[in-house]
Amino acid sequence: MPVSLIEGDSLLAVDIGAATTRAVLFDVVEGQYRFVAAGHAPSTAEAPFKDVSEGVRNAIGYLQNVTGRVFLDTDRVLVTPSQPNGAGVDAFVATLSAGPTLRAVVVGLLADVSLESARRLTETVYARVVDSIGLNDPRRPDEVIDGLLTLHPDMVVVTGGTDGGASRSLQKILEPIGLASYLMPAEKRPSILFAGNQKMETEVKSMLGTLASSLHFSPNVRPSLETEDLEPAARELARLFVNVRKRQLKGVDVIDAWSSGHILPTGYATGRMMRYLSRVYGSAKGILSVDIGASGTLVAAGFKGKSTLGVYPQFGLGENLPGLLNHTTLENILRWSPLDISVGVLRDYLYQKSLYPSTIPATREDQAISQAIARECLHLSIQAARRDFPSNAASLNSRLLPLFDPILAGGGALSDSPTPGQSLLLLLDALQPVGVTTVILDQNNLLPILGAAAGRNNLLPVQVLDSGAFMSVGTVVSPAVQAAYGAQILRARLTYEDGTEARSELKFGTIEILPLPSGHGGTLTLQPAGHADVGFGPGRSGQIPVSGGALGVVFDGRGRPLDLPSDPVRRRELIKKWHWTLGG
Amino acid sequence: MQASLIHILPLTTITRERLLPVAGRVTARLNQKVSPTDVVAEAAWAREHVLIDVAGALRLSIPAADRLLRCKVGDNLPASAEVAVGRGLFPKTVRAPKEGKVIAAGGGQVLLETGETSLQLRAGLPGNVIEVVPERGVVIKTVGALIQGVWGNGRIETGVMVNLAEKPDGVLTSARLDVSMRGSIILGGMCKDAETLQAAAEVSVRGLILSSLFPSLLPLASKMRFPIMVTDGFGSLPMNSAAYRLLSTNAKREVTLNAEPYDRYTGARPEVIIPLPVTTEPASPQDAEEFAAGQTVRMRRPPSVGAIGTLITLRPGLTLLPSGLRAPAADVKMETGETVIVPLVNLEVVG
């Protein structure tokens, strides 16, 4: 009996990143959707290729070689739907993060209300806010016009006004935006999203309709002062983003046509998947997804159906790297390195890597620098994302990260790590999770792809998630505690399914592992010492079922917040020791 | 696998667009022979705008204010010109605060553009105009050597190239610069201090070609009024041997240094063009190439950033690197004779 209207259909998905384009095939195996294979190729948004569809065709070509199936015809055009001879696929979706960071201007009335919503909305796509225009802006209208003409924004996000509320103030703010657009060459005018007072739609159309590159409307992000609902506007902004990319990058229109419009910004697709997961699997804890790539770092979180999404191009590992120093210091980055690296070498690295975002570390030192930067980018991203987490999210301490289970991690810096231990240590350092959490590695970067696929086939993501396509690194226990180095903070007993037991005594400043292979489960009994808290309350013991993973059960006894030794020699020794404990 | 390319060529046909940033008038003709200093297009544009709120000043409704406007789009207004005059026994007059051109009038407001400046676009390189882009500029073709870099400060100049870099890893210091280099384009090495850039400005050089630049000097280098091109990157990097050989052997020739910022999406790169006389037109540079044995390649990542080598073999499958990563890679024979394994994404083809 069919459980989906398109059950049995194969689906090909591509993710077009700044550095790499991935093609992934899903098909029905024994009555269930499965991740079949993945292919990848360097992205081709940049010169000399200047056509993203080339990279897509190359990645699909790789997939053809891996699977022995044919997806492209002799003209390298996607064959869809699938043919009687087995060639082609039934459905195709795409996600996109390649391309330059968009320049965005946010417009609203009050700085703490609508402008804040506009900022949050803009953070759902790969954009950088270059100007903010509000009711209390001290600039004259002509100064705003000249500012916009200098900045040449790619998009303007307008919020403000409650539905049916006053419109005159917002109208006054929009006038210079319309005039600035009028003065720009037609091909350089910004796309505009209006997500404010719904009663103003006709007025906004007459003011800006012919002056914007494209004018989009969405439901009000602030229908009332107390309520914020970003999702409908984020959906429209995702569409606007793709429209801008179609103008900027050759080949996006081809992929959009192949997917029948099912192309989404990678961040938005991930956010969609996290909303879904938090509804289906949501517990008292939140769920968290992080992705560190060349285009940016992405943090998506779900809290019982409420979700947040932050895309931070300023913390990407590609062309924006020199700008990282506007947010942190060289010393802050180097504190994560296991090797003795000078600030000069690091500074040169940041600038040199920005020239060649798709390059990879070939030496140990280069890898150490790369991983230190990834840690700092993720650390800064989670700090930025925390501003938007709900205040009632479950946590052990308001200064620490809320409780999350599971944590899903993807992106080149994590999925391409030489070992799962290196990926895990990067996550533990940067995120500093507390309590008990499962860490899952999205090695094939499937999460955004599943988010895009959900728009065509709502059964596929569920079945693929349950099929083991993701790699469980293990269960991590991170007590919230501060103690003297070497002091005992936790006793743990892991009872395996066959009744045998393994024990660990965790000392402050150390990491320990109890083996528990993937596919196996066990019961973990935790006895914190003193005021250490693993989620049962300070000093309180408890028992929980745990599942295995590549590393088993990992105990992170380094305390929260993580306080690395200030002595660089001792710090590097400890980092090496932690690396070694997690398998090097 | 498709390769990234950087052009370092002793003799090639070079075709370059020279376009205004805004619409203007093209002064060059099709098939015209141009020298680097010839003006090929010009434009005028306003630096600032003045928005006059007529309705607000006269305290009238928008339609009423619009009826009282005494100017229309396209009018050039002197400072204090009447923009609108109110009604009554003692009518209030709204005047233009400064000289400007009316570019929008209506909705109770008048928008003036003021502070018009003119822009002249020079050919920048010697050659023939092979295409006129209406209102924007021209496409010029020339023949000569082409050396591309990785960073430029957005300026362009032509001058005689003077070689101050005795070897690829030389350091350019302020002590090497003197008044005899005025009007020259300097082939330097690494630049490590602000004094060198300031000395170059004081001497009035026409440009600097550097192997590398300290990142801390980027803001200053960006502000310099003469072009600066970096061939290999940031920090203390020697000049790649292919670029050094070509540049140093062409010292004392007139060169065009177009320090156009590197734009990875359009493919624009800073470059040196050395016009050379030929009897037959050589081939244009390749736009794209697949990696293949025998190619000259340059390393883009440690170890040996910027070093030139020859691709010996493409390794099958994925290769384990000292970093622990696995990636498609190639065996590359360096100029020292040593053979190293390099991931393909860390290579670019020189050609």
Image (cartoon, helix red, strand yellow):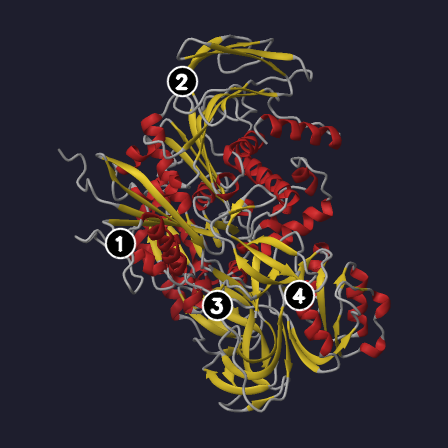
Q: CA distance from mark 2 to mark 1?
A: 43 Å
Tag 1 or tag 2, which sits nearer the N-term? 1
SS for callout 1? loop
Residue at 62%, 54% (x, y): give it.
Answer: B340
| Dot 1 alpha-carbon crowd within 10 angstroms: few under 14, some 14 to 19, many 20 or more | few
Tag 3 or tag 4, which sits nearer the N-term? 4
Which label sits in the foreground, 2 or 1?
Answer: 2
Position of B280 compared to A33: left or right? Answer: right
SS for callout 2? strand
Q: Which residue in the structure is indicated by mark 2?
A: A521
Q: Which residue in the structure is indicated by mark 3?
A: B288
Tell if the residue under mark 3 belongs to the same chain as the one under mark 1.
no
| Dot 2 alpha-carbon crowd within 10 angstroms: few under 14, some 14 to 19, many 20 or more | some
> What chain does badge 3 belong to?
B
Image-quadrant location for residue A379: top right
SS for callout 3? loop
User: A29 above or below A199?
Assistant: above
Position of A138 compared to B102: left or right? Answer: right
Tell if the residue under mark 2 belongs to the same chain as the one under mark 1.
yes
Position of A461 compared to B21: left or right? Answer: left
Residue A465 in picture, x, y percent from top left: 34, 33
Which label sits in the foreground, 4 or 1?
Answer: 4
> What chain does badge 4 belong to?
B
Q: Which residue in the structure is indicated by mark 1?
A: A260
| Dot 4 alpha-carbon crowd within 10 angstroms: few under 14, some 14 to 19, many 20 or more | many
Tell me the amino acid under the disc marked 3: Ala
Label 4 with label 3: CB-CB less than 8 Å: no
